[in-house]
Image (spheres, rainbow, N blue to C red):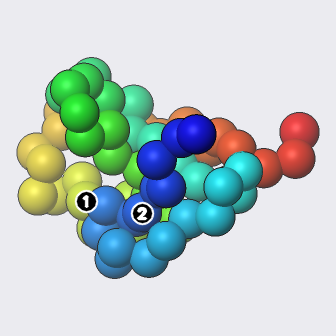
């Protein structure tokens, strides 16, 4: 069973299988804490504090 997801910015729970965003920068996707976000607004709030040069996100989860 996968660990429950929470938004890295607002800490809102993300339901299992629900759509969410993942940061495309490698440092945000390595190690134990892979950053996921519930909305574009939360992802955009993360970018200035992370100091990414080429930031982007990938939408994952949800019905295909």
> The N terminus lies in which quarter of the figure?
top right
Q: Residue at x 11, y 58 (%)?
A: 49
Left or right, residue 3 beside residue 34:
right
Asked whether 31 or 19 is in front, the reply is 31
Residue 63 horizontal/vertical position (percent): 87, 47
The residue to which callout 2 is attached is: 6
Q: Is residue 34 visible?
A: yes
Give the crowd class for mark 1: few <14, some 14-19, many >=20 residues within 10 Å: some
Q: Is residue 31 found left or right of 4 in the rendered image? A: left
**The residue positioned farthest toward the front in the image shown:** 1
Mark 2 or 1, which is nearer the eye? Answer: 2
Q: Earlier in the sequence, mark 2 or mark 1?
A: 2
Dividing the picture into quarters, in which one does residue 15 lie? Answer: bottom right
Q: Position of residue 30 (x, y in %)?
A: 25, 24
| Residue 41 seen | no
Q: Which residue appears at 33% of the width and 46% of the height? A: 35
Measured as percent of width and height from the top left, residue 36 is found at 42, 50
- Residue 19 is drawn in which quadrant? bottom right
Which numbered dot is residue 46? 1
- At x 66%, y 55%, the residue is 16
Name the quadrant of the C terminus: top right
């Amino acid at each position: 069973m996968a660990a429950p997801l929470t938004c890295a910015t607002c800490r809102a729970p993300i339901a299992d299988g629900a759509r969410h965003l993942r940061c495309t920068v490698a440092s945000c996707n390595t190690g134990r804490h892979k950053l996921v976000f519930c909305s574009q607004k939360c992802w955009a709030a993360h970018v200035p504090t992370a100091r990414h040069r080429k930031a982007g996100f990938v939408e994952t989860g949800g019905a295909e």
